[in-house]
Image (tube, rainbow, N blue to C red):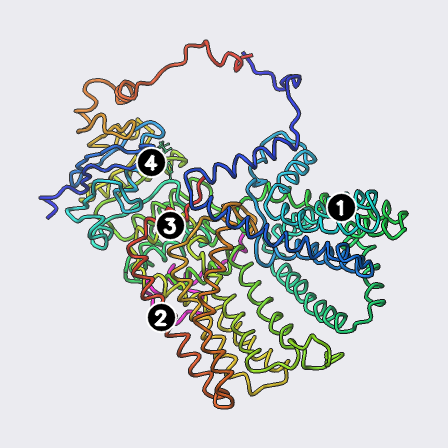
Amino acid sequence: MTGEHPALALRGLAKSFDGKVAVAGVDLDVPAGSFYGLLGPNGAGKTTTLSMAVGLLRPDAGGAWVLGHDVWADPVTAKQLLGVMPDGVRLFDRLSGAELLAYHGLLRGMDPAVVDQRAAELLDVLALADAGRTLVVDYSAGMKKKIGLACALLHGPRVLVLDEPFEAVDPVSAALIRDILKRYVAGGGTVVFSSHVMEVVQRLCSHVAILAGGTIKRVGTLEQVRGDRSLEDVFVEVVGGRTATGEELAWLSR
Amino acid sequence: MAVPVTAPASQVRPVSARHFVKLKLRVMGNNFRGQGWRVALFLVGSLIGLWFAVGAFFGLAAPGLAGDDRYALLVAAFAGGLTVLGWLLLPLVFFGVDETLDPARFALLPLSRRTLVTGLFAAALVSVPTVAVLLALSGLVVTAGVFGGWSAALVSAVGVVCGLLLCVAGARAVTGAFASMLRSRRVRDLAAVLLAVLAASLGPLQLAGVAAIQDTDWDRLTGVASVIGWTPLGAPWTVGIDVAQGRAWAAPVKLLITLVTIVALLAWWSRSLESAMVGAASAGPTRARPGVTGGVVAQLFPRAVGRLRRDRFGALVSREARYWWRDARRRANLITIAVVGLFVPVMVNFGGQGFTIDSDQGFSAAGDSSPVLVSLSMLFVGLLAAVTLANQFGFDGSAYAANVVAGVPGRLELRARITAFSLYVLPMLAVVAVVIALVIGEPTWIGFMAGALVATYGAGLAVNSFVSVLGAYSLPETSNPFAMNSGAGVVKGMLTLLAMAATGALAAPMVLAAALLGDTWLWLGLPLGVAYGVGAALLGAYLAGDVLDRRQPELLALVTPRR
Ligand SMILES: Nc1ncnc2c1ncn2[C@@H]1O[C@H](COP(=O)(O)OP(=O)(O)OP(=O)(O)O)[C@@H](O)[C@H]1O
Ligand SMILES: [Mg+2]
């Protein structure tokens, strides 16, 4: 099954908010076992696309398949295979980190003993065990990201969808998360993540897609997209960035 | 090259209250953008408000229109005083305050506290309720004008405006103070007790009021009214009639009383504002409880549900149970149920026992309590408890995404939520039934009273399961548990009314049975009521769960606050 179907397949996903197009028909095939980076400027539609891919936001058109299971027609099976860390969404943050993990584990129908064991390990590895019974609402931004990641990993999903996992985490934790994700992919898992950090994407990803203005502009393996240039150059070219000429914002340097 | 640390302040234009008002209007307008149904609900709500305001206007103008100046002072003092009390207490118990402009958003702006308080105060004045109350109490101006001519009318108008300022300042100060108390863990239980005492004092007040009305000694009542007139409660409203009745010297003194009170309230508010601005949505530092025993799963389950299976249902119930206690907004709702649930039935049923001052008077509706009356008051309590869940997903906000991602089946979700809430509410309802039965001296009635309570509560859960799935709305992510979005305020009111009406209709058989079945109902009431309630709740969760399964992403979008 894994062989025939891509880990995540998006077909013609489209969404507009109050008449304003956020995503205009995205097709994407994420091969199983790949490390997939989704790039794009602010407001490109990354969060919207990923939300539609995991069943958080109903698309206006198109569909999403996880290892061949339709996310919108057969959500139970598809969601079982998915681990998700959405962006801009609160956690149940009036629970402590341990309670939150237990909640997520049981919600996924896991055996309590397994939850106990895995949660303890995750808290330990992610350096969250010290937080003890502090409520997640009182965590720092980086700690929240880490506990969110732990929740997504806990049930051992086949496909991980992460929205900006490296935002706000310190370099040590970032390295840690990179190692965890690399091991996860080496073990046969698939990771799809959005990021603004070119350096991380370049270091980790086997495949890259660049999204801008709600459509895919470049897609392929890292080598195909990058060619012989740096990923950042390609990105700036695709997105059509501008550099400050020094004329505007003169008042900043007084 | 280097940016000077002290930038020249020459071009800084002063910020005035006008900016805040404009900002509020703009935010309200943007909330409505592209949401026709919100505009429609807002208009309907405003019309209903206006309708009541016009009615009250004529009520208050009645002494003037009838030319009977005996009651003028009475009406002004009592109606005005009740208005102030209502503005102080109702936001705490029922409605919340409109926090379209969240003070926390201004924390980073270089605004002096005075600018901020006057600005937010001015913005708070721009709302439908203030307009409605202003219109209603203008009736006093008419009365004053009839008896005292233009000068009295003018003084009265000034008084009414000051009174309105007093109401708004009072509501802000009280909710602000309670919010900051509820925020800090240390005193949150104290706050609960205080709120309870406050609401409890309403009971005796009402009884005193009933006694006073039954006691048709108008002279004594007028005496009471003139005393009230010298307190901040009545001062602004009675100045007009004072001038009209030749006590012109009283007017400046009373206006001074009012102004001092307003300033004091604003000062109080400004103190709690500071804590609202710096205190994040956090519920305060957690008590460090070292020595965590057992695994993470054991930590999730509160002791009260320790026997639940360690599965999805158990996890959902545990999380909800913890949230009802840890989330200030939810806790405020629980306190409301407890307080109102005890005191409304006491007020309704107390007439028969010892407080009958004059039994041949017209106020015998609250006379001897009967099974029907008791059942009706139980119905109200059950209604109130269940309607708390009308926006149960709104409490979660975007955190509900976790359940969507995990694909929790709708029926399981609703059953778990009902179970967790009932962990708190059923004991409360039991206490209500026992206490009320003892207070009215009819211990044999406990059975059917509890039956009526559970039946209404269960029917209400069924109705509100649907309402919560179909009519959810987002709550602002602020630290103030009393905060509402202005657009949502009207929506909330309408939904609550609808849900309550439907629940009342569903629970009506319990009252009918109490009226028709006589003594049989004494022992049949409990089993039938409980069966009805449990059956209704389960059926409701079953049917609404189906709807929820089809609407999960839409529901998530509804409860996600737009930032
Ligand atoms: N709930 C919403 N209502 C209205 N418009 C929305 C909503 N969510 C997203 N949008 C719009 O859709 C577009 C895409 O937003 P999205 O959050 O997907 O971007 P993004 O690529 O994740 O950006 P970022 O890198 O800043 O996270 C934006 O123009 C945004 O304004
Ligand atoms: Mg995003």
Relative to B347, say whether B37 is above or below. above
Q: Is residue A195 left or right of residue B419?
A: left
- Where's ligand 2: which quadrant? top left
Q: Distance of mark 3 from mark 4, alpha carbons?
A: 16 Å
Q: Distance of mark 3 from mark 2, alpha carbons?
A: 38 Å
Q: Quadrant of the C terminus of chain B?
A: top left
- Residue placed under numbered mark 4 in the picture: A175
Residue B361 point in image, percent of width and height: 73, 77
Q: Among all residues in the image, which is located at the extreme bottom?
A: B519
Label 4 is found on which chain of the structure?
A
Dominant SS type (magenta): loop
Q: Is residue B284 left or right of residue A186?
A: right
Circle nearer the viewer, 1 or 3: 1
Q: Is residue B89 magenta?
A: no
Q: Are marks 2 and 4 on the same chain?
A: no
Callout 2: CB less than 8 Å from ligand 1: no
Residue B383 point in image, percent of width and height: 50, 67
Circle nearer the viewer, 3 or 2: 2
Disc number placed over residue A123 in the picture, else none: 3
Residue drawn at 19 percent across, 46 percent down: A66
The amino acid beneath tag 3 is Leu
The amino acid beneath tag 1 is Ala
- Under tag 1, what secondary structure? helix
Q: Is residue A245 left or right of residue B101?
A: left
Magenta range? B286-314
Residue B295 is at least partly visible in this image? no
Residue B468: quarter of image: bottom left
